[in-house]
């Protein structure tokens, strides 16, 4: 398959004669995917929304990313082994129809992240081209993202490889200019304080940033040859996305004290002065690539969801393109409507995702590594009745529900604070509680059920 050809495969297993690439390409994929303004925005939450001091913000960003990346990178080895997208593989844990809720959730996530990518892209273009209205910039970034998503897997890999150097150069130039030309913002010294609540909120944001990749890590490793070593896939993903997340996020925390009205791009422009046009121009294609990843993965998730209820349907590349276009329209409308309150909405969106994604990650990884040891019957993923996995896996669904319930007492948000979160002074460790409870409970439940489900 050449990089200039529109990808023909959708959710079905990639034939062995079309497998290609090396595990090291996963490093540039995830490093380049993180090199965009949205990652900087996430880091800025530490010193804006969470009001942390800069040292506290840096520690929280590093801790959250290093922890969350462990779970994200563990999903990477599933792609080469099975050759199918991550959400299709989830049918092996939840059953053909049992997985539908999780797939719906992931589709919602894609639309939300696509909208945030378009907003930051529109803000970037408007910052360097004031005559270009922000809504027009949002539309322009969206169109470029959609074109990349249309061509699919190989072009996205190529684009992220380029962004490793292009948008990575923007991050480096930002650091150099702020540190050695304009100087660190004077307001940074006395800005914010350490608070357990804010610190753990940022740790959670960093962890979620990485956990949110988990539902589609395999989408970009499924073309690798099946003999790709799981350790190679793990470490390539781990260091690619960990470094790719930490470096821009610390930059965001650095500029956070001068952010006004949630507009991080404008803060970059004010701090970098004459270099701002070059920096934002280097950042812009990275935002478009982030949008492309959302449109492409969202289309695969939508096809997986539709196939659940219409299993005889054989989705083609045309269907993938049409669905990606529909996701683009939905993200565009959300982006245009929420741009004025972007930073606050983005923070709340991330909190919601964290509570819902943690139980799925626990079930998926325990099942793959500790119960089935990577041995799945792929044809059953596409069987109308779920094959050997059935339509519903009650144990997995129950554990997912348990994971959400367990988190509730530890939740600390503006709308609700659980009793255990209050006892901890408002610190939210709900995602840790979810992982700690769901993992062993599902392991023992699945071991009992496993005896009747050997491929």
Image: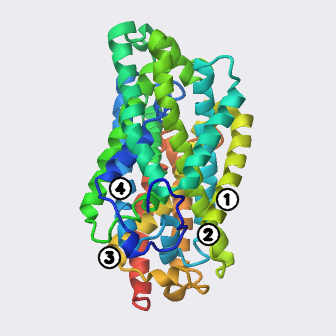
Distance Cα–Cα, label 2 vs label 3: 31 Å
The answer to the question of whether label 4 and label 2 lie on touching residues, with beta carbons closer than 8 A, is no
Distance Cα–Cα, label 4 vs label 2: 29 Å
Labels 2 and 3: the sequence-earlier one: 2
Query: Residue at the spot x=70%, y=42% of the render?
Result: 332
Single out the mark in the foreground, 4 or 2. Answer: 2
Q: Residues within 10 Å of mark 4 (few under 14, many from 20)?
A: many
Q: Is residue 253 left or right of residue 96?
A: left
Q: Position of residue 280 (x, y in %)?
A: 50, 24
Dot label at residue 316: 2
Q: Position of residue 144 (x, y in %)?
A: 59, 41
Q: Position of residue 453 (x, y in %)?
A: 43, 88
Single out the mark in the foreground, 1 or 3. Answer: 1
Query: Residue at the spot x=48%, y=38% of the render?
Result: 201
Query: Residue at the spot x=46%, y=22% of the render?
Result: 279
The answer to the question of whether label 4 and label 1 lie on touching residues, with beta carbons closer than 8 A, is no
Query: Residue at the spot x=63%, y=34% of the render?
Result: 119
Q: Residues within 10 Å of mark 1 (few under 14, many from 20)?
A: many
Q: Is residue 214 above or below residue 168?
A: below
Which residue position is annotated with label 1? 323
- Considering the numbered disc 1 on the image, is that residue within a helix, a strand or a loop? helix
The answer to the question of whether label 2 and label 1 lie on touching residues, with beta carbons closer than 8 A, is no
Distance Cα–Cα, label 4 vs label 3: 16 Å
Labels 2 and 1: the sequence-earlier one: 2
Which residue position is annotated with label 3? 373
Labels 4 and 3: the sequence-earlier one: 4
Q: Quadrant of residue 229?
A: bottom left
Single out the mark in the foreground, 4 or 1. Answer: 1
Q: Is residue 130 above or below residue 329?
A: above
Quadrant placement of the N terminus:
bottom left
């Amino acid at each position: 398959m050449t990089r200039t050809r529109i990808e023909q495969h959708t959710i079905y297993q990639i034939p062995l004669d079309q497998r290609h690439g090396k595990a090291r390409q996963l490093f540039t994929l995830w490093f380049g995917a993180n090199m965009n303004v949205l990652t900087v925005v996430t880091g800025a939450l530490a010193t804006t929304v969470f009001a942390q001091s800069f040292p506290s913000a840096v520690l929280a960003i590093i801790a959250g990313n290093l922890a969350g990346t462990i779970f994200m990178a563990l999903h990477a080895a599933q792609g080469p082994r099975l050759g199918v997208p991550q959400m299709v593989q989830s049918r092996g844990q939840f059953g053909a129809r049992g997985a539908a809720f999780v797939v719906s959730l992931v589709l919602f996530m894609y639309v939300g992240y696509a909208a945030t990518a378009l907003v930051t892209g529109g803000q970037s273009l408007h910052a360097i081209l004031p005559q270009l209205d922000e809504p027009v910039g949002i539309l322009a970034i969206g169109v470029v993202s959609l074109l990349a998503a249309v061509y699919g897997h190989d072009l996205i890999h190529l684009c992220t490889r380029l962004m490793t150097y292009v948008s990575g150069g923007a991050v480096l130039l930002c650091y150099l200019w702020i540190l050695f030309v304009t100087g660190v913002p004077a307001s940074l010294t006395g800005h914010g304080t350490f608070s357990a609540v804010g610190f753990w909120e940022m740790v959670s944001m960093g962890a979620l940033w990485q956990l949110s990749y988990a539902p589609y890590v395999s989408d970009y490793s499924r073309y690798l040859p099946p003999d790709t070593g799981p350790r190679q896939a793990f470490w390539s993903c781990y260091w690619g996305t960990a470094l790719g997340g930490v470096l821009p996020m610390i930059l965001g925390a650095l500029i956070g004290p001068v952010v006004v009205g949630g507009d991080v791009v404008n803060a970059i422009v004010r701090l970098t002065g004459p270099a701002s046009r070059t920096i934002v121009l280097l950042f812009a294609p990275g935002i478009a690539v982030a949008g492309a990843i959302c449109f492409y993965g969202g289309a695969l998730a939508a096809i997986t969801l539709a196939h659940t209820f219409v299993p005889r349907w054989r989705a083609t590349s045309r269907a993938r393109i049409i669905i990606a276009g529909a996701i683009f329209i939905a993200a565009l409308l959300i982006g245009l409507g929420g741009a004025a309150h972007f930073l606050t909405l983005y923070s709340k969106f991330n909190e919601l995702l964290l509570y819902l994604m943690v139980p799925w990650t626990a079930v998926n990884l325990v099942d793959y590594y500790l119960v089935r040891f990577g041995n799945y019957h792929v044809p059953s993923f596409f069987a109308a009745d779920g094959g050997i996995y059935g339509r519903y896996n009650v144990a997995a669904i129950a554990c997912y529900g348990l994971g959400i319930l367990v988190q509730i007492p530890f939740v600390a948000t503006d709308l609700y604070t659980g009793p255990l979160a209050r006892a901890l002074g408002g610190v939210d460790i709900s995602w840790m509680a979810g992982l700690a409870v769901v993992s062993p409970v599902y392991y023992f439940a699945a071991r009992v059920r496993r005896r009747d489900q050997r491929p």
